[in-house]
């Protein structure tokens, strides 16, 4: 807009001086980061670099008390900004000074600092808060799980708002120091490395550090009584696994699976390149749920995953996510295929290595399982919609797309793509079209039509890029075991 001002020059100049040059331009940051599936998730106007969470959790009462210190940089002239948190807040400070705050929507915490934050400035936010996470409903549901001896915070995409204030979207990754005090005799398990622990006046404090960029939904906390195993990898990375002491009949199978974490990670390194993080492990708390989640450096596994015996396939799935999902994360939640298609395909590759059915045989079998009129084919893995974000087709049809790519470009280029991609976007974010472009670059082939067929058309691809003749398809030995891990998606 051009506005003509008819005033004598001298007066115009003094008017300009009278108005603080910036105040008028300072605006609130958006209440969402711009995700088409979840418009209010995350926030606009700033970028977080570090979360320091100092928490205290009492298993008897489920009371969580926290002080979160957030280090961020403004990406616009900010008069106000939002954080995402459901628990009750008692005080907010910005750069040390008390700030006004208000609630809106389901999880928005609107923070108004005493003075605006100019674009590009680094600032600190301290939020003091408390509440009982299991009693908190957001969007009509509860995310964390209580256990007989504690609680577990692990879910996707909604998890953080039940235990810490954040910019709750994978686009804004940060490092974390998570310090949790729990009653003596109880442990707190989180991501990364356990830096230290100490006990005082009946409370033991565990200090965890995640030193690589981590998405909010990949931050996890489990409080309870655990058997803990520790080790070091050949490369010197610390390994820490934790198992609830009351896993009952599932204990042996859980340990026989998760204790193979280092072996699985070494095998994945041979396909995807160097393991991207500073620590390794997994934990199996005594939760009633059936799912598993790729929480960074330390995946979460429900005991039910081990109800039929050892299940290394689910360990393969969650560890593959450390490359495909955790290091390279979705730009928006519609890009979920770049996580789940590859985690599922990793299970197929493990089956191939174990001699329990090649990826091709699994692809043929999955393809044959779903007739053309099966609703399975109406889900577009490349943009499944929020309601189908974790539908079976995102995994299985998603993996079919990857087998189709393998057949199109050949073994050498296929595995070069699989290994190159996590390096190309390490610790960042990417979308489906970025993968298509990368595969085209590495292979020198035009692949957009292939991905359009397998990821975006709501019909069964007519001419399978797969090998087997119809009717001649036998069930691979690993099929049922891999299908049994489908409950990893039932997160609610
Ligand atoms: Zn997954």
Image (cartoon, rainbow, N blue to C red):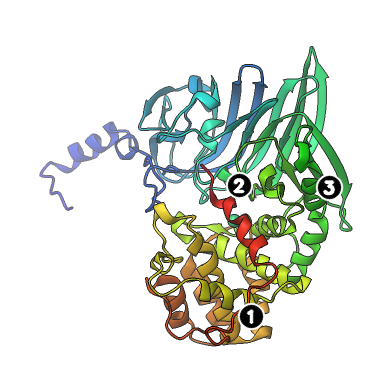
Of the two numbered discs 2 and 1 in the rendering, the one whose residue sits closer to the viewer: 2
Q: Is residue 17 left or right of residue 159?
A: left
Q: Which residue is mark 2?
A: 291
Contact (Cβ within 8 Å) of mark 3 with mark 1: no
Residue 413: % across, % down: 64, 83
Q: For ligand 1, give the image quadrant.
A: bottom right
Residue 47 position (above or below residue 199): below
How crowded is the residue under tag 3: few (<14 C-alpha within 10 Å), some, or many (20+)? some
Total numbered badges shown on the rendered structure: 3
Which of the two discs, 2 and 3, labels the residue nearer the N terminus?
A: 3
Of the two numbered discs 3 and 1 in the rendering, the one whose residue sits closer to the viewer: 1
Q: Is residue 197 left or right of residue 51?
A: right
Q: Secondary structure at mark 1?
A: helix
Which numbered tag is attached to residue 414?
A: 1
Q: Nearer the viewer, residue 352 or 442?
A: 352
How crowded is the residue under tag 2: few (<14 C-alpha within 10 Å), some, or many (20+)? many
Q: CA distance from mark 3 to mark 1?
A: 32 Å
Which of the two discs, 3 and 1, labels the residue nearer the N terminus?
A: 3
Q: Which residue is mark 3?
A: 238
Q: Residue furthest top?
A: 201
Q: Is residue 417 visible?
A: no
Residue 20 position (above or below residue 57): below
């Amino acid at each position: 807009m051009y506005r003509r001002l008819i005033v004598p020059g001298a007066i115009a100049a003094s008017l300009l001086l009278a108005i603080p040059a910036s105040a008028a331009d300072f605006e609130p940051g958006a209440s969402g980061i711009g995700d088409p599936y979840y418009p209010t998730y995350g926030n606009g106007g700033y970028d977080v670099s570090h979360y320091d969470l100092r928490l205290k959790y009492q298993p008897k009462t489920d009371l969580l008390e926290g002080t979160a210190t957030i280090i961020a940089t403004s990406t616009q002239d900010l008069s106000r900004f939002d954080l995402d948190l459901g628990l009750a807040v008692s005080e907010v400070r910005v750069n040390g000074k008390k700030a006004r705050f208000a609630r809106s929507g389901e999880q928005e915490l609107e923070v108004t600092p005493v003075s605006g934050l100019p674009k590009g400035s680094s600032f600190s936010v301290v939020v003091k808060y408390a509440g009982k996470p299991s009693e908190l409903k957001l969007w009509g549901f509860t995310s964390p799980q209580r256990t007989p001896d504690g609680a577990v915070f692990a879910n996707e995409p909604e998890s953080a708002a039940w235990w810490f204030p954040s910019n709750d979207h994978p686009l804004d990754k940060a490092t974390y120091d998570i310090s949790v005090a729990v009653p003596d005799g109880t442990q707190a398990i989180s991501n990364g490395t356990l830096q230290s622990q100490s006990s005082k006046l009946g409370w033991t404090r565990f200090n965890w550090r995640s030193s690589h960029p981590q998405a909010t939904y990949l931050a996890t906390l489990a409080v309870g009584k655990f058997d803990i195993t520790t080790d070091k990898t050949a490369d010197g990375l610390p390994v820490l696994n934790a198992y609830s002491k009351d896993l009952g009949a599932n204990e042996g199978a859980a340990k026989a699976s998760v204790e193979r974490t280092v072996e699985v990670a070494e095998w994945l390194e041979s396909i995807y390149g160097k393991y991207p993080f500073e620590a390794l492990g997994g934990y199996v708390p005594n939760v009633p749920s059936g799912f598993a989640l790729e929480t960074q450096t330390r995946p979460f596994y429900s005991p039910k995953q081990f109800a039929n015996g050892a299940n290394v396939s689910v360990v393969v799935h969650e560890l593959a996510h450390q490359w495909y999902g955790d290091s390279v994360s979705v730009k928006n939640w519609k890009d979920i295929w770049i996580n789940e298609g590859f985690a599922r395909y990793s299970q197929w590759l493990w089956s191939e290595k174990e001699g329990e059915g090649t990826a091709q045989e699994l692809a043929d079998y999955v393809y044959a399982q779903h007739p053309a009129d099966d609703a399975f084919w109406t889900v577009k893995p490349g943009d499944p919609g929020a309601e189908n974000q974790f539908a079976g087709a995102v995994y299985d049809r998603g993996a079919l797309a990857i087998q189709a790519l393998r057949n199109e470009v050949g073994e050498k280029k296929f595995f070069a793509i699989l290994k190159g991609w996590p390096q190309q976007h390490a610790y960042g974010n990417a979308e489906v079209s970025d993968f298509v472009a990368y595969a085209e670059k590495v292979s020198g082939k035009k692949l957009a039509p292939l991905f359009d067929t397998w990821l975006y058309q709501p019909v069964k691809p007519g001419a399978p890029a797969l090998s087997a003749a119809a009717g001649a398809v036998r069930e691979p030995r690993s099929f049922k075991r891999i299908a049994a891990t489908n409950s990893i998606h039932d997160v609610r």
